[in-house]
Image (spheres, rainbow, N blue to C red):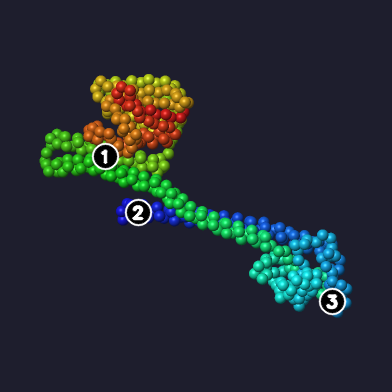
Amino acid sequence: MNRKSIFRKQQLRFMILNLLAFTIIFTIFGVIIFGQVQNTLFSKADEEIMKFKEMMVENPFPNERIPPADEEQQGSPSFDSRGPNPNPRVILLHWNKAGEIVNEDQIGTLLYENYFEEYTVDTENLDAFTNITFDETYTFRYLLFKDTDPNDEIAYTQLLVNIDPEQTIIENFGRLLFICSLLFIILSISASYFLSKKMMKPIIQSWDKQAEFVENASHELRTPLTIIQNKLELLLVAPQEKIMNKFENIALSLSETRRLSKLTSDLLTLARADSAEMQLSKQTIPVDSFIKKAAAPYKEIAESQEKHLWLDLNSDVNMEADESRIHQLLVILLDNALKYTEEKDSVGVKSYIEDQKVVIEVSDTGVGIKEENISHVFDRFYREDKARSRETGGMGLGLSIAQWIVASHSGTISAASNKQQGTTFKVKLPK
């Protein structure tokens, strides 16, 4: 399976997961909103029914009692004489034990004959608000409860409120919510595609960096191993030879072994840095005296190479840092500066305070770095002049390690060409 196919499948997987997440979120959100709107609209009708029920209990309507069937009826009471301020929206039905409406005269002949004549009461929904539709057109919400008066033939009382306006609002809102949900899902497809591409970018970059890292590391490891193997094979060809006659082969093998050891050490440092496994051990460091001490051996090296190493230290302060890592940082910068300078060139270390931070500059008057290559100098295994780097023993990992050391101290490092000749590395570290 090639690289593009793997990335395409992974991106599709991310896209599906994002789409599912968006769909679930929108569905839950829609259900919650729809439920809240429905409950809010029905709560008004429920409140009217409960108020009517309380009015019946606290202030019984005149002539509300319906006498038994064998008693003589004294007229037909109407809503006009039923009590103080009854709610005109509420329809009152009285049911006997046989499941018959006993107050049809009170609700009106037209209403009774058209809707309630064939209607039967459902006692399973006792004391619960329930919706019912008549003639597939009109929707009512009702509350059914038992009658507490043992002196009449009423077994159940039912209070109904027409909720057609509320039902219309709910249906329209449901349609609107459904259409909006479809639009959101369509938009989420585009958003999922965009997000999946965004999510794939760091993966692709990491993949490319890892592949490049493995390729470069393999190349760097192969060269010294090949040299060591060739020289050892030459020694095996002539086992009777004296060491002094094979001195060059042995010396070169040792040199490549040291180079190989340094390479593996640098690779291990970067691997631990990537995994955040390496921890810093910070302590108080006097900046100027520390730099002076770290640069002392390189003064002697510079003199032996007929170069000039100068110090201009102006930061007589202390800072909290990992002493061994800051020492490693200075070694990398000074080692690079000496490697890429010729005789009579100079290397300088300068320190000062800027924006409440310690600034360390390591500059040289050497070959310098081309302007277009400055942005790549901190890349792993990057070498501007690979042939020259091979001669000087450079592997392109030092500045990557330097960048990690600075970043782990919450600082910054940058490279710039000197105005006249050479390169300046500027490190900014918090106190």
Please count the marks in the image.
3
Between the C-alphas of marks 1 and 3, the distance is 111 Å
Q: Are marks 1 and 2 in contact (CB under 8 Å)?
A: no
**Which label sits on residue 387?**
none
Dot 1 or dot 3: first in sequence order is: 3
Give coordinates of residue 127: x percent, y percent: 72, 66
Q: Are marks 3 and 2 in contact (CB under 8 Å)?
A: no
The answer to which of 301 and 104 lies nearer the viewer is: 104
Please tell me in which quadrant of the rendered image residue 393 appears: top left
Instruction: Give the residue pinned by disc 3.
Output: 68
Amino acid type, mark 2: Ile
**Dot 1 amino acid type:** Leu
* Residue for point 61% across, 61% down: 171
Q: Which mark lies nearer to you, 1 or 3?
A: 3
The residue tagged 1 is 260
Q: Which comes sooner in the sequence, label 1 or label 2?
A: 2
- Residue highlighted by disc 2: 6
Residue 300 image position (x, y, % from top left)? 29, 23
Between 141 and 421, the residue placed more toward the observer is 141
Q: In this view of the protein, can residue 347 be seen by the observer?
A: no
Q: Residue at x 23, y 32 (%)?
A: 388
Quadrant the N terminus occupies: bottom left
Disc 3 element: loop
User: Does 92 sit above or below residue 257?
Assistant: below
Separation of residues labelled 3 and 2 (CA atoms): 85 Å
Q: Nearer the viewer, residue 160 or 127?
A: 160
The residue under the point 82% across, 65% down is: 79
Residue 257: x and y in percent read 24, 38
